Structure formats: C-alpha cells, structure tokens
Amino acid sequence: MNSLRPNLTRVVFGWCVGWRLVLVLVMGSISESASAASRLVQSVTRQFFVSTTSESTPRAAAPVPSGTNLVALDPGSFAILAERIKESLLRELGAADEWRGKIFFILHPTTPGTTPVFVQNIRFTDAWQYQVDLHDRLDPTQMARTVVQVLLQEMANRKAGSRAAELPVWLVEGLTAQVLMGGGPTLVPQPRTRQTYESIAPDTFQAARAVLMKQMPYSFSDLSLPSTQQVSGEGWAVYQASAQVFVAQLLSLPEGRSQLREFIARLPRYWNSQLAFIESHRAQFGTMLDVEKWWSLASLNFGNRDRFAKWSHDASLARLDEILQLPMEVQPAATAPAQLGRLRLQEVMEKAEYPAQKALLQRAVSQIQLLQLNAPPDLVRLMNDYRVTILGYLRQRDSAGAEGPRGQPAPSSVAVLKEAREQLDVLDVILGDFRKYAPAAAKTVAPRTVNGAAPVP
C-alpha cells in the first residue's frame, strides 16, 4: 500500500448533519508514477485515522452487489460511522471520551477467501496504537463489532504495560449488540435504501429471545472459555444471544456501568478474565458460583418476558393459576391428620371460616394486582375481573352480618356466596379458553443446575 507523502496539498472541511461531527480531510499529493492516490481522513476527536489502499480508491463509488447487506466504506463515511459507534459505546458504559491510543483503519478491496478484519496492537515506548485492516465492504454488524473491539482494546490498554489486554469474546459481542440497539437503525445507515420507522420501538432482543427460549443459554464459564462448537455453526447464535443478554443484565445492575468499566481496566492484570470479573463485581458476587446462580435466574426471567418486559402468555397464565389455588389445611378423612393443600377460590369460600378465608382472599387480590402490571395486555382484563369479583364478595360479606354456627355463612350471606361462585365459575371458563386458544409460544428452557442444586435467589 502507498504511504502518505509529506507534502500536503489541501485541507478540506466536511460535516455530518445531525451528529455535529467535523472531519479534517488530509489529501496526499499524487506521484506521477502512482496509478491512484491514497486518502487519509482524521475524525473529529482525532482518535481515528482512516485511509485506503491504491487498489480501493478507484472502486470507492462502485455499487454494492445486489442481494447483500454490505455497506460501501470510504475514509470519510467510515470516520463518521466510527465516531457514531464510539459515542454509542461511551453512552452504554457511562464513560467519558478519554482516549490515549490512536487507531488507524486501512480499507482494502474485498477479496473472496481473505480475512475481512485484522486488528494489530502496536506498543510504543509511551503508548499503544492500533492498526485495523478491513475490507471496504462490510455488513453493519461486522463493522460495528470491529470498531467496538478496537475501542475496548484501547480502553483496556490505557494503563497496561508491555502486555496487551485479552478481551473476552462475550464482552465484545455483548457490547456490540448494546451499541447497535442503543444507536438505532440510523447508527449504520444503508446507502441508497428506504427505511421505515415505527412509533413503537422494535423488540431489540427479539432474535436473542427466540434463541434462548429454545436453547439453554451458555453459562458464564462457557461464555468466558467457549469450546469450538460454541463459537461456530448453530452454537454461535446461542453464544451471541447469551452474550447480549448477559451484558444487558450486567449493565442493569445498580453499579453496572462503573463495574463494567472497572472490569475492562483490570483485564491487563489477569490472564484469566474471570478473575478480573470477580474483582470488579465483588459487591454482587463473592465466587464464580454466585455469578452462575445470578445468571441462571436472570436468563430465566428474560425468557419469560416479552418485548415490553411483560411476562410471556404462558408464564402469566401459570402464575395466575398458582394465585387462584389458595393454600389451606384440608383433612382427607375423618381420622386422617390435616394436610396442607391448595383449593380453588370457590372451595375456600365454602369450607373456610370467614376470618381465615378473608385473609387468604385479600392476599390473592394483592398478588393478582401485581401480576396485572407484568402480564400481557390481553390477560389484564381477565385478571382485573377476578380481582373485582373477590373484592365485591369481601365487601358484601362484611356487610351481610354475623356468621352462623361452625363458621358457616349467615342466611343473609348465602346469596352473596352463590353470586360470587357463579361469577368465578364463568371466569374459570374464560381462563380455560385463554389457555386452550392462546398463541403457541416456544417452550422456555429451565436454567441449568449448578453443582447438582437448583439455583436460588
């Protein structure tokens, strides 16, 4: 590739509408013997330097092959996109732009059978610098992953000595997904394409949720030290989905962003990234077993929720069934000891003394109200009908008068009990219809056990 000659001919100022980015375009003079010139572009923050080889320059305006998801890259557009990706990454980590190492991107012609991206860490006496050789035709995800990877490498190496940090794959994949999710569809726009934007944000975890509802997510140990099968073929999709959800759950912790920044800074000190993780997240996890338990519960909770963070249809119905079966001591036979069982609402209203059933029913009302906040919209009305029916029954029983012998309802309460039973019977039929005709949902895979024991909170 041609190097930039020292005599500069001109400086061109450009702009990026909406992102307030100004690029300084430095053009090298053309040698008479050179067939084409290389162009070097420095980004607005002066961290990125983008150039092309002489072979790439003539085809910069060549159309992208139809039927592909590739983005045509030139130094100017790539510098803008790299700044956008860095801005999104810093926002996800809650970090300031305090870069120390310069990053040089060199765009090469896309050649079948060659590696699309190659990253080099270059150690100087006073700082690290980075050179990234990449194809001038990349898909948006691959491009974002490349920029995120080298930016994380630069963050980790700021206080490193002669040994560069080794980034875990899950960190790069997870943060790449977060960057693409946070930046939206305009982060890496497709040229010469028409895009439609919805007023409701798309389900950014749709692909990950679909994978993890069918396949068990990888453990933290597998994410840190994956096997060949887990990072190739069908296993790679499970790995990417697991990494995306794992990083999103980490960032949602109370000190998640600062802890993840600390983890990145600690990487050069450890050969094993798991040790750096435990040190940076010591407030939440004391051992690797604690991490595995937390991740098992977090992944299960994620799989049971939809795009609006609501519980899935099946999970909501299962929880409603559990609430409607009240715990109560029952005696199967006259001489048998009482046993703790679960009875439907109608049975509790008939068999339990009113003070006891009132406490159980009030608790059920509170649980149904909480479930309404997490349930899909089509189930909310049914849950509210259960709640209103129970509250109406309690209100009428309280005003119906004293109870008869052995806790049986007073004559004035018989009509109240009958009406409540009929309403609950109708709601149970509707609940059965919801269960029978509900849209088919993928079966949630239970989290793996840790050392033979089920995960606990």
Image (cartoon, helix red, strand yellow):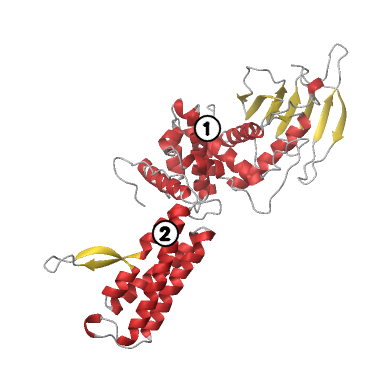
Q: Quadrant of residue 324?
A: bottom left
Task: Look at the numbered disc 2 and give the secondary structure of its residue.
Answer: helix
Q: Earlier in the sequence, mark 2 or mark 1?
A: 1
Name the residue at 50% across, 63% down. Answer: 380
For residue 244, say whether it is visible: yes
Task: Look at the numbered disc 1 and give the secondary structure of its residue.
Answer: loop
Q: Quadrant of residue 157?
A: top right
Measured as percent of width and height from the top left, residue 46 is found at: 73, 36
- Left or right of 203, for residue 14: right
Q: Of the residues shown, which amino acid type is indicated by label 1?
A: Leu
Q: Nearer the viewer, residue 179 or 96?
A: 179
Name the residue at 42% across, 59% down. Answer: 432
Residue wearing tag 1? 167
Residue wearing tag 2? 432
Q: Nearer the viewer, residue 122 or 176?
A: 176
Measured as percent of width and height from the top left, residue 210 is found at: 51, 42
Name the residue at 54% across, 26% down. Answer: 162
Above or below for 208 versus 361 = above
- Left or right of 112, for residue 449: left
Q: Of the residues shown, which amino acid type is indicated by label 2?
A: Gly
Q: Disc 2, disc 1: CB below 8 Å? A: no
Identify the image quadrant of the N terminus.
top right
